[in-house]
Image: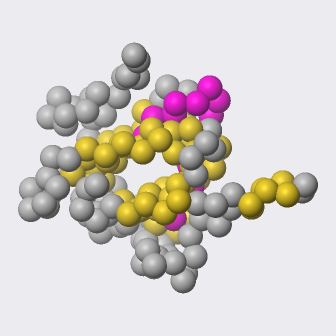
Amino acid sequence: MIDGVRVKPLKVIPDERGRLMELLRADDELFLKFGQVYMTTAYPGVVKGWHYHRVQVDHFVVVKGMAKLVLYDWRKESPTYGEVNEFFMGEHNPLLVQIPPMVLHGFKCISEGELILINCTTEPYRAADPDEFRVDPHDPEIPYDWARKDG
């Protein structure tokens, strides 16, 4: 596991009315602080990444569909420099993944329909000075291929 990445298995509580699933609580061991919560979606086969933050910590949860979340540690001072982590998360594997600053991350929709991802960040988005930096998802310097691995 990449240094600083934390994973929380989520519990779905179903009943005859529907389902409930807590994502992140202020009394969770991995809770840091609140910045904002937003939703993003992706259509089947779409890759959203790579990106990273200098300060912000992300907390990703997929609430509809399935995603392949990929993290790449490009922090040269990190004990896990160069490591890649994959998480298959969503309706069939409910997880919260905490992503530390400076870890490249992206996700691909691997479900047949649109996926919905919720992110609870530690910092609010500032349009005038965003802590959001992008890297080409197919950058040859990053040892990862987004293609489906059959076999």
Please state the horizontal and vertical placement of residue 127, each as a whole percent of the image: 42, 61
| Nearer to us in this view, 15 or 81 | 15
Please state the horizontal and vertical placement of residue 136, each as a whole percent of the image: 27, 35
Residue furthest toward the left?
77
At a point 52% along the width and 68% down the height, the residue shown is: 36
At a point 49% along the width and 63% down the height, the residue shown is: 8
Please state the horizontal and vertical placement of residue 47, each as a whole percent of the image: 42, 33
Left-right relation of 130 to 78: right
At a point 29% along the width and 27% down the height, the residue shown is: 145
Residue furthest toward the top?
151
| Residue range of the region highlighted in magenta in the rendering | 107-120
Name the quadrant containing residue 103. bottom left
Quarter of the figure that contains the N terminus: bottom left
| Nearer to us in this view, 5 or 14 | 14
At a point 56% along the width and 38% down the height, the residue shown is: 66
Quarter of the figure that contains the C terminus: top left
